Amino acid sequence: MQLVIKRTRRKQRTPVRSDRRRGLKLTSVLLCYLLSLLGLTACGDNENNVVSGNRQQILHWGNGTEPQELDPHIVTGVPEHHIITALLEGLVLKDPQTLEPIPGVAERWVISDDGLVYTFHLRDNARWSNGDPVTAEDFVWSWWRALQPALGNQYAYMYYAIKNAEAYAQGKIKDFDQVGAVALDERTLQVTLANPTPYFLQLLDHYSMFPVHRPTIEKFGEPAERGTRWTRAGNFVGNGAFVLKLWSLNKVVIVEKNSGYWDSDNVKLNSIYFYPTENVSTEERMFRAGQLHVTGSIPADKIAVYKKERPEDLRIAPYLGTYFYRFNTTVPHLSDPRVRRALAMTINRKQIVERVTKGGQLPAYTYTPPDTLGYTARDGFSFDPEAARALLAEAGYPDGDGFPQTEILYNTSEGHRKLAVAIQQMWKKNLNIDVILNNQDWKVYLDNVDNGHYQIARAGWIGDYVDPNTFLDMWVSNGGNNRTGWANSDYDTLVLKQSPTAPSRDARYQAFKEAEATLLAEMPILPIYFYTRNNLVRPSVKGMPANLLDYTLYKNIYLQAALPEQVE
Amino acid sequence: MGRFILQRLLQAIPVLLVVITATFFLVRAAPGGPFSAEKAVPPEVLKALEERYQLNQPVLNQYFSYLGDLAHGDLGPSFRFPGRSVNEMIFAGLPTTAELGLYALLISMLLGTTAGVVAALKPNTAQDYIPMSTAMIGICLPSFLLGPLLMLVFGIWLEWVPVSGWGNIPGDKILPALTLASGYTAYVARLSRGGMLEVMSQDYIRTARAKGLPEWVVVIKHGLRGGLIPVVAFAGPAFAGLLSGSFVVETIFQIPGLGRFYVQAAFNRDYTMIMGTTVFFAALIILFNLLSDILAVWLNPKLRQQYSSHSG
């Protein structure tokens, strides 16, 4: 038997070997295939984006999310803003250092003495990227388009400073000729305002007021049609410092220097790559691996690490925004201003910014951030647990006795949760009251706040422009962004009547100060801190100063590595 | 066989209809609309938007008009991305997701079966325990942990591969494919070990051994064929799962695939996009289950006979 087996084995040997060989060959072919598919074989010591970008003046930019659209009259977000401001240009730009208006398409402008009529003189070398001149009529037509309700422009209200623009948008006026925007000739645009609006020039640099190229839009659809193909790469005609080269969905948007731009001699970058970097942790790793020059943000727990190890990459800058809680003033126990003030006075904001948020934020004792275009409101309250307990007792809850169960609502986020937990503990310690926390998905949260289904809700507000008005006009009675149920006729008069017609900036700010004092005395909102804008920027990125609005003027940016940049 | 396939395809229609109906009404029942935003939307604008997307009509009208469009293969415009149709977005994301899924499937099949077979050869020894406990770790380690871990080690410390992207930089497909494959590799390893153990105790294996064949020929030629049937049966659903379940990996590695759209759509209440991706994935899962059933029938002589005699 054994002999037989041995013989059989011997007989088997040859086919076995060829089997093995065949098997090996198959395996190696498969492996090679797999590896080449994965691109491993191409893996060598390639330079990273930052190094090659520095050499070729290509900026790699972490842009948060995929842009919704690139139509300036449809979009609403910051990522879209970043791309659109590279592709299109309004009448004026801002100096990124001072945020003062500087000439854009308009080379100069004249403001009438009453502050109501603005006459813009357009430069004659302003061109669309297809070579057409940018005319005053382009602006009038673009603004007409932006106000068409069918377009669904959520930023239409940016136009409401212009005479009759609001009535036109709401359909109360049918004739656009009654709206205060007229092309006097090809190069002169006259704008008439409803009220003197000191921040009007700033609005002109918002993408919702950018011009669009009429023939291009009409080529791809109706003027007020949403989502036609005019914004695609190859179709897009803009007047900005860059032109759209590629828009690869969820991957990258590439813009290239526009040689026909009126100031192209001063544009140093050859190209900008905008990446949709939704996941902030991945974005930070991309930055560390040299794939990005600039990130959109930084994970909060990484701030301390960067402060210690790579402070040159970390940028912490004041930002025109306030983090606050809304009170639902229609809830019985929160309808008493004494209760709201007591709650506000027992939050130790210094501790919060130093130990919880840890991103250089400033404690907020007013709603409008300090020094907003020279406006600083008086502190409306202070951290004073003693006085707060007295107020709460006065309101009928001595030592927190009988204080109804109260809930803080916030949209799901680790940062909001940590802050809410800290506040929960401070209120327990200082007022002996219990609050519960409730987190909800963003849209659910918005829905509940909008419908008043909350008691205390977390909120944030970023100014649209640098002026106290962007913070204070939201609290007028029944204002769309009020959502607290709070209404005060004195406040309305100050913000809606007195400030727009005030003869001087001082008088105007005085009206705002009075309004803000009223707001803080009654406290429908509870300011917590003023935002900072925290992100990562490679030291080789020059000409990009930090400012309150996180405003970037791409044409000023250039890349210059002192030494070959290290990845780690 | 033809009747079997036809029967299964007909069964798929009511299943899809249930999926469509449930999703359609559930997304509309969720609080918060597609156009709600932190900054209040002026009422006249909201009205125009709702008209544009027919949200001002009764829900039943919306439902039937959606079904009508769907029958023509039109999944509607995306609410979130005004310039894109859902069809366009699905076809933009699908190739990437499919490529990623394919690599992950290949990796998991190759590594998984090898590990499973190796383990099954010497059950209850170190040769079994080591690959199987590694597999257990693979099952337990979620991709949102494994992904960043791999990025840290191979992308940042060793600098061998990029940490994100897809087809931008050479080598950027390696980590996502490995991350996505890990759980499936482990599962395949366990399946093939089980299958092999069962087969290796069968009579015909004893016969093969008795013939005097070297052990590895027995394993590869006689053992694998039967031992891998459970793996083959798993491959279809696994591929469907890899396609529909890649959103975590796609998000971590910034991959422009379909999974990311799916998740974003849910957060944005992009009704048509949620519907489109759900219907698409449902159809895909049904299709791959069918394919794997067909393959299983084809591999299993007993079933093959049964169906051919039925149809014959």
Image: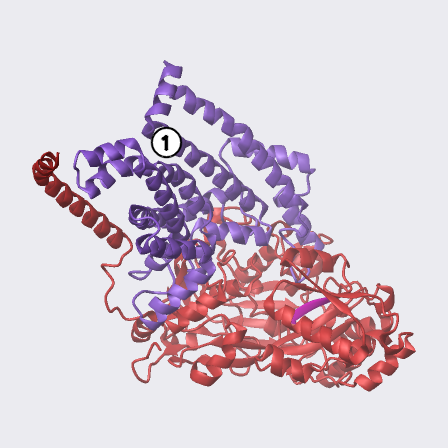
Q: Is residue A9 left or right of residue A475?
A: left
Q: Residue at x 59, y 46 (%)?
A: B271
B112, A149: nearer the viewer: B112
Reading the image, the residue beneath label 1 is: B296
Residue A373 found in image quarter = bottom right
> Which part of the image, by quadrant, shows the N terminus of chain A?
top left
Does the image show residue A242? yes
Q: How is the image coloured?
A: by chain
The colour of chain B is: purple
Q: Residue A527: give x, y in percent of width and height.
A: 72, 76
The colour of chain A is: red
> Which part of the image, by quadrant, shows the C terminus of chain A?
bottom left
| Chain for numbered disc 1 | B
Q: Residue A142: give x, y in percent of width and height.
A: 55, 58
Q: Residue A134: give x, y in percent of width and height.
A: 47, 63
Q: State the extent of the magenta-drawn residues as a range.
A: A457-462
Q: Residue at x 74, y 68 (%)?
A: A326
Does the image show residue A96? no
Give the overall secondary structure of the magenta segment. Answer: strand
A76, A496: nearer the viewer: A76
Q: Residues within 10 Å of mark 1 (few under 14, many from 20)?
A: some
Q: Secondary structure at mark 1?
A: helix
Identify the amino acid type marked 1.
Ala
A63, A3: nearer the viewer: A3
Q: Residue A324: give x, y in percent of width and height.
A: 70, 73
Residue B266 counted in the magenta span: no
Using the image, determine if residue B245 lies above or below residue A307. Answer: above
Q: Is residue A281 left or right of residue B126?
A: right
Residue B274 found in image quarter = top right
